[in-house]
Each structure stands twice: as C-alpha cells, then as structure tokens.
C-alpha cells in the first residue's frame, strides 16, 4: 500500500468536507441542529492528518528494520527515523524533486525504493556515488583505487531467522567521513555469482570468483549492507537511481527488545 497516497486521499476528503461545511453547509443548518457525524469526524481528523502528512512528506518518516542485512549497525526490530529533506524537498506521491538540498555521500545510511519494485523500501549504506570505481576483492573494498582502512574487532554472534546462531568477523571500516562496523562471514564467497541479475548498466560491472568491479553511472548510487554476506544489495540487483532515494536514516527511536538502543544515532 502506498501510504503517502492514502494520506493524501484522506487529507483531500476531510479537508474538502471541512471547507464545504465552513462556507456552505453550516449556514444552511439551523443553529440548534447537530452536525452530521461525517462532518464532525472530518473536522476532527483533518488537522491531525494534515500535520502527519506534512511531517512524513517533508521532514521525517519512521521505518521498521525487517531484516539483518545492516547488522551490527541496525538490528531486526529497530524503529528508525529518516530525514526526508537531507537530499532535497520532493513532491509527495510523485517524488519529484522541487528543491535541491544535498546529495548522498559515501558512508551514509539511506532508505530508498527498491529498483526492481518501487513499492518496497530498502535500507543500505552508500558505498559508491556517481563516477566511482568500486572494487570488492577477497572481502575488502577499494574505491577509486584506494583500499579502505579496516580494524579487526571481537567476533559478533547473532541469530539468523530465529533458527541458528551465526558467528562473524567484525571490523571497523572507514568509508568517507564515516567509521562503522561491518560483519564478514569467512565461509561465504565475496559474491554469490549465481544470484547476480541482469540489471540496467550491468555492462559497467565485471564479476569473478574473487569479487567484482563496478563503475557507478551518473545519477545512480551503489549500496551495500553492513552485514556483507547476508545482504541483497547492489552487487546483485544493480545501481539505485537518484529518484528512488527516500532520505537519510539518522536515529533509532525504539526497539521493544533492546530499550538501550533508543536514541542511538545511526552512523
């Protein structure tokens, strides 16, 4: 369901009823007559829907993390806030940009519409911006010829789909201005070649058993999950168009299972 379209529809209906009553129906009712229920409800809900619509469309929007592709940065069950104005002010529903306010930078965690199905929202970290040459060999990232700095940390264990525990290597990785944790499963290949699809600009990528090289086209971005070997990302389904970007994730505002994560900034 397109929530923005639903909110806009409710806003138009309740606002229309409020205007109709304000300038026409109220004058025709007798002073002692009670408002019909549909007018009373519309007038009550209209300001609430208006505030929510403005907040979600132009300022912040909440999302829930459904998968473990961004562990350890984001856990399953985290409720996060996304800044809608970090990369431009867009028209609701149409998602066309009205005002430019910035562009995604390497290392930022962003929410975007999945290229293969724009009704789905994905969250990943920006690894490559337009024009970047991304190379991933033997579980190490190189951007524009520069190997990223990493630092080995203690191993990290987590439950995968509630069935088994996974023990992964954990590293600090510096990407742009951002220093964040990534997980590596030494038993998994850098890329599962059988899962790589035919996506737009696929000819800008080269794959082999040790990894891949991709050159990011103009107006697109290359995304990867922090849980590198448990993430469906640009390695498999391609580049993310700028028009698909929703906003920058900046805060964990709730987690029912781990209250200590409330208020954690997303880095």
Image (cartoon, rainbow, N blue to C red):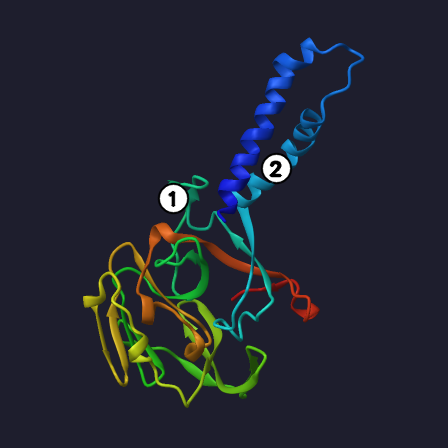
The answer to whether residue 239 of the structure is visible from this angle is yes
Residue 110 is tagged as none
Q: Nearer the viewer, mark 1 or mark 2?
A: 2
- Residue at screen point 54% across, 30% down: 12
- Residue at screen point 25% across, 70% down: 214
Q: Which sits in the foreground, 188 or 30?
A: 30
Q: Total of numbered circles in the picture? A: 2
Q: Position of residue 256 (x, y in %)?
A: 68, 66
**Viewed as shown, does residue 169 lie left or right of 103?**
right
- Do the numbered discs 1 and 2 sit on residues whose CB atoms are within 8 Å? no
The Cα atoms of the two marked residues, 1 and 2, are separated by 26 Å
Q: Which sits in the foreground, 44 or 228?
A: 44
**Residue at label 2?**
49
- Determine whether 264 is above or below 206 in the image: above
**Viewed as shown, does residue 125 lie left or right of 197?**
right
- Residue at screen point 46% across, 76% down: 227
**Residue at label 1?**
100
* Corner quadrant of residue 48: top right
Residue lying at the far right in this picture: please name it: 32
Q: Quick one: label 2, few (<14), some, or many (20+) residues within 10 Å?
A: some
Q: Which sits in the foreground, 14 or 104?
A: 14
Q: Position of residue 49 (x, y in %)?
A: 61, 37
């Amino acid at each position: 369901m397109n929530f923005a379209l639903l909110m806009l529809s409710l806003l138009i209906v309740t606002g229309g009823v409020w205007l109709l009553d304000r300038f026409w129906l109220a004058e025709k009712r007798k002073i002692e007559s009670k408002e019909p229920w549909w007018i009373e409800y519309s007038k009550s809900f209209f300001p609430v829907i208006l505030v929510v619509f403005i907040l979600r469309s132009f300022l912040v929007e909440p999302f829930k993390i459904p998968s473990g592709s961004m562990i350890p940065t984001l856990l399953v069950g985290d409720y996060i806030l996304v800044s809608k104005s970090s990369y431009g002010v867009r028209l609701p529903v149409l998602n066309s940009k009205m005002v430019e306010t910035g562009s995604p930078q390497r290392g930022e965690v962003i929410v975007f519409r999945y290229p293969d199905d724009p009704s789905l929202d994905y969250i990943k970290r920006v690894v490559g911006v337009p024009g970047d040459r991304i190379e991933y060999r033997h579980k190490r990232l190189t951007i524009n010829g520069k190997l990223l700095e990493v630092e080995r940390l203690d191993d990290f264990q987590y439950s995968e789909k509630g069935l088994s525990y996974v023990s992964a290597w954990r590293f600090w990785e510096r990407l742009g201005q951002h220093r964040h944790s990534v997980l590596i499963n030494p038993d998994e290949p850098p890329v599962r070649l059988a899962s790589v699809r035919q996506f737009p600009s696929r000819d800008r990528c080269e794959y082999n058993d040790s990894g891949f090289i991709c050159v990011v086209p103009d107006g697109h971005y290359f995304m990867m999950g922090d849980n590198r070997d448990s993430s469906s990302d640009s390695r498999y389904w391609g580049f993310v168009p700028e028009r698909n970007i929703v906003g920058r994730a900046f805060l964990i505002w709730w987690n029912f299972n781990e209250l200590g994560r409330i208020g954690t900034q997303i880095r």
